[in-house]
Amino acid sequence: MLERFFKLKENKTNVRTEVLAGLTTFMTMAYILAVNPSTMTAFNDILGLEGSARMNPSGVFLATAIASCLATLLMALLANYPFALAPGMGLNAYFAYTVVLAMGYSWKVALAAVFIEGIIFIILSLTNVREAIFNSIPMTLKLAVGGGIGLFIAFIGLQNGGIVEGNPATLVQFHSFHAEGVTQTANVSVILAIVGVIITSILLIKKVKGGILLGILATWILGIICEVTGLYVVDPAAGFYSMFPDFSGGLQLSAIGDVAFKMDFSNILSLDFVVVVFAFLFVDVFDTLGTLIGVASKSDMLDKDGKLPRIKGALMADAVGTVAGASLGTSTVTTYVESATGVSEGGRTGLTSIVVAVLFGLSVFLSPIFLAIPAFATAPALIVVGFYMLGSILKIDFADMSEAIPAFLCLIAMPFMYSISEGIAVGIISYVIINLVTGKAKEKKISVLMYVLAVLFILKYIFL
């Protein structure tokens, strides 16, 4: 049955190879189960939310695991590719830090934006519009967006780990170990976060499979040792919680009800809401297409014209996964570049994805373990994934300043303005104006859509 459905021999693989590839892929991306709940609900304590206004981390964990399972299963069934999907890094940070914290929307409105973005993505996946949109945005900006998101989530990782903190004079600074009021527990947390970055880096350099996940677990174990020895003192009021999993309350599977189908569409007609939807859609479309083509090219899955067969099914899995994820209570679901690790192990068919989906499904029953992992242990994962994403800027032509300067502005705007959407807006506006004024617009054949987007973003800054 497996041979008939997945065409294993035709793809020069077998069941054993596919299972091992699936295990490898899951190990390299399972960190999202720990990172996503802490990232998406970071605004709870910052805003001091209480009761139903809070977003339940347990619910987000379950939504993350179930949405990843469903989307990856769809990838196997609709496209027969060894690609895995989960809520995207960067987009979860955009959800929490830009849409909720900076723009002031509730998490329920943010989920509505993700849901609508997913519906639009489904429509685009059924037509050829997605190619038109993809082709209208200059490659330089596509690369800059990826790099900018990398810097943005690395900055968030530095904050979550306490390595970087606020300073009224310089805006930010390195953690002050001897400042008045700083506790030993806070200092220990920062040290552990720094050690975690070093451990994770060593594992990746040594090419240890699942290096990011192992880095999180190693940092967590060191934290538990500090708690046992009294170096780390539990103080929930100060945000320092026990690192031991709490199974006393059971698995709390009902927590999914706190976040599932809680979308709020009341702001659907506001221009700001449209910008939020566009930002989610922009990053999702380009991140997905870039990941699919990038991973497929490493495994000779592209045809003679450099195109990916069955890409419509792959995109549909991504789009439906996003709609399902938003409905369940998590941010945009996207294809993971970590799928390349499974491909490098010989994974060539959807059977690899089936294995990953099953493992995500089983993780539902491990929620107390993942939810006990502290922020300083997941911070190294954010920083290292940011490093990976920053690598996209190496393909930018820095010798051509009409390309490089808009890319640079897009790149730095995201972390410095603390917003992915602002970075996209700055990049598009600067690209159009710089190339138009310098006379390079005709030569580069800037698309009509780029001009429309530039005007819309300018109007946004004038009137909002």
Image: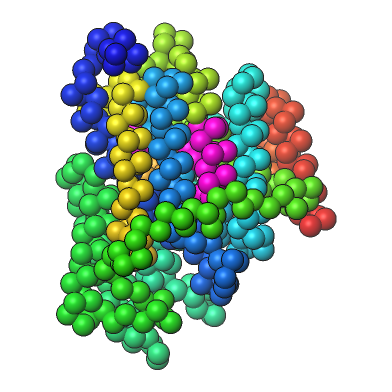
Foreground residue, 459 or 54? Answer: 54
From what the image shows, is residue 248 above or below residue 348? below
Does residue 50 appear anywhere in the picture?
Answer: yes
Identify the coloring: rainbow
Residues drawn in magenta: 318-341
Q: Position of residue 429 (x, y in %)?
A: 69, 44
Q: Residue at x 49, y 28 (%)?
A: 317
Comparing 333 with 385, the one in front is 333
Horizontal side, residue 227 vs residue 290: left or right:
left
Residue 393 appears anywhere in the view: no
Residue 308 horizontal/vertical position (percent):
45, 17
Query: Viewed as shown, does residue 195 lie left or right of 106?
Result: left
Of all residues, the one furthest to the bottom in this rendering is 180
**Where the N terminus falls, by quadrant?**
top left
Residue 336: give x, y in percent of width and height.
Answer: 40, 37
Q: Is residue 251 magenta?
A: no
Q: Quadrant of residue 37?
A: bottom left
Residue 245 found in image quarter: bottom left
Q: Is residue 292 above or below residue 48?
A: above
- Quadrant of the drawing holding the C terminus: bottom right
Any magenta on residue 323?
yes
Residue shown at the point (40%, 15%) measured from the top left: 302
| Residue that appears at 40% across and 58% down | 252
91 vs 190: above or below: above
206 sits left or right of 80 in the view: left
Query: How many circles with numbers are drawn on the protein?
Result: 0
Name the spot of residue 70 as percent of width and height, x first.
44, 35
Question: Residue at the spot x=67%, y=63% of the render?
Answer: 104
Among all residues in the image, which is located at the extreme right? 463
